[in-house]
Each structure stands twice: as structure tokens, then as C-alpha cells.
Amino acid sequence: MVAKKILWMAAVFAGVLLLGGCGRGRGGWTPGEPTAISIAEDGTVTEIVQETFDASYYNADELQSMITSEVSQYNTENGEGSVEMEEFSAEDGTVSLQMKYASASDYAEFNNTEFYYGSMIDAQLEGYLFDVGFKQVRNGTVHGSEVTGSEVIKNMADQVLVVRAPLEIKVPGNVTFTSSNAEVLSADVVNATGEQEEEEDAGLVLPSSAVYREESTYTEKTEANRVYIIFEME
């Protein structure tokens, strides 16, 4: 995410990062997280980032120039307009940034992250197994107990967004399911936290089990950070 790029750039200037709430969104939506995205029906992605730094440790002009350079390089390689920096401001130590991506794949590639948007059928063809627990959502409220992915994939007419946490997301429709590691904020906004409920104590851990757990820690964390959001188009 661009927020990660800003974090790295701030380190160049020995900056100290303090996360703050986001600024304005679109359509009356005000994100509550430092990084948020809104995806349109045609697949264009708007990213809103707001980060607060110790103003004495960074140079706003250099920061903007570095982002502009990365955008220019990406567009040279992938086509003009693939990524745009729509807004940049820096005041009293707070950097506000708004980016626009021509497609979900541009967002994924530019930010070197997982980000899929498309139909349920195409998602399965891409290798997504939906093999996690899901919450059922109606009118922005979670209903009933957890359901399985096999139940979710029956809704073939729905669209799906697959992202990496943490990220706040506004979708172009009504959310019908989310993976259990997400918080439903409204009918079309989800906070992809990547956080699961704590499992009960498994009891005695044998040495062989401990080795297995250590080897699989990275994989487990990676899978935990993948968030599915299924929604009906408006």
C-alpha cells in the first residue's frame, strides 16, 4: 500500500510515524483508518492515506517528489493513467494523499500486495478456495453464526474482493459476506483487520508440534491477513 511507501520514505528522513484518522472520502464516507480504499463498479480504485509525522524530520517536497517519481516510472512501464496522484498536502506534520488506480491489478502491482476484484467464478479460477469461516451480512449487520466457504460460493452472481489486512474498504454495492477476520462497519464499508478471535488453549504442546508451529508461523500469518469481501452490485 502507498502507506507502506510513505513509511519507508519517512525513514529516509529519520521520521517518526504516528498513525492518525483518515480525511474525507467520497459519497459522504469518512474513513476511520489511516489507509482506506474505495473501489468503483468499473474497477477503478481510489486510495486515501493520512499519516502524521514529526514535522521536523521530513521534507514534504521531497516526499511528494519521490511518490511522483514512482508513479511516473510505473506509468511508463504500464501505460499512462494506470496510476495517478490526485491530491497531496502536508500541513502541521500531517501528510494527506489520494491516489487513483485504473484497475485492481494496477493497485496490486504498484503496491506489491494482493488485491483481487472480480466475479466469484473468476476468483475460483484464479485459485481462491474460500476455505475459511465467513460472516453473513444483511444491511450492514452480521446475522447468524459463522458459515463455510462452500455456502458462500453458491452466490455465483456476487462479486468478491480479496485484500491483505489491515485496510478499510468501501465497495460498490451491499456486502453479503466477509471472512471472519473483518469488521463490518456499514452496508458497503468493511474494516479488513485480519484479526481472528483467540482460540482456546490447545493444552500440552509436544516438541514435534512446537517445531511444526515455528516452521509454519509465516504461512499462518500470511493466510490470516487475507480478507474476503463478497457483495451484490448496486
Image (tube, rainbow, N blue to C red):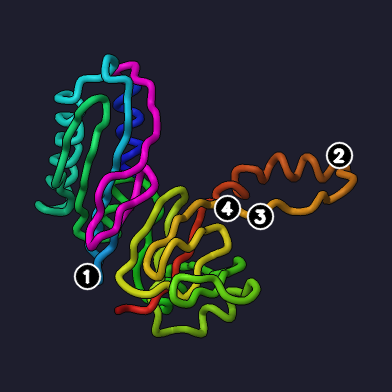
**Neighbourhood count class around disc 4 (C-alpha, 10 Å): few under 14, some 14–19, many 20 upward:** some
Mark 4: amino acid: Ala
Q: Is residue 15 magenta?
A: yes
Range of magenta residues: 12-37
Mark 4 = which residue?
Answer: 224
Q: Magenta region's main secondary structure?
A: loop
Mark toward the viewer: 2 or 1: 1
Q: Position of residue 77 (x, y in %)?
A: 16, 47
Residue type (three-letter) at the residue carrying disc 2? Pro
Dot 1: element? loop
Residue appearing at x 16%, y 53% in the figure: 82
Examine the rendered structure and indicate whether residue 214 appears above or below residue 45: above
Residue 54 is a magenta residue? no
Q: Is residue 156 visible?
A: yes
Mark before the other along the chain sequence, 1 or 4: 1
Q: Which residue is mark 1?
A: 42
Secondary structure under tag 2 reads helix
Split into 4 quadrants, where in the image is the C terminus? bottom left
Residue 211 spot, x, y in % from top left: 77, 40
Residue drawn at x 34%, y 28% as measured from the top left = 8
Please tell me the numbered disc located at residue 207. 2
Q: Quadrant of the N terminus?
A: top left
The mark that comes first in sequence, 3 or 4, is 3
Q: Which numbered disc, 2 or 1, marks the residue that appears first in the sequence?
A: 1
* Residue at 88%, 48% in the rendered image: 203
Q: Amino acid at mark 3?
A: Glu
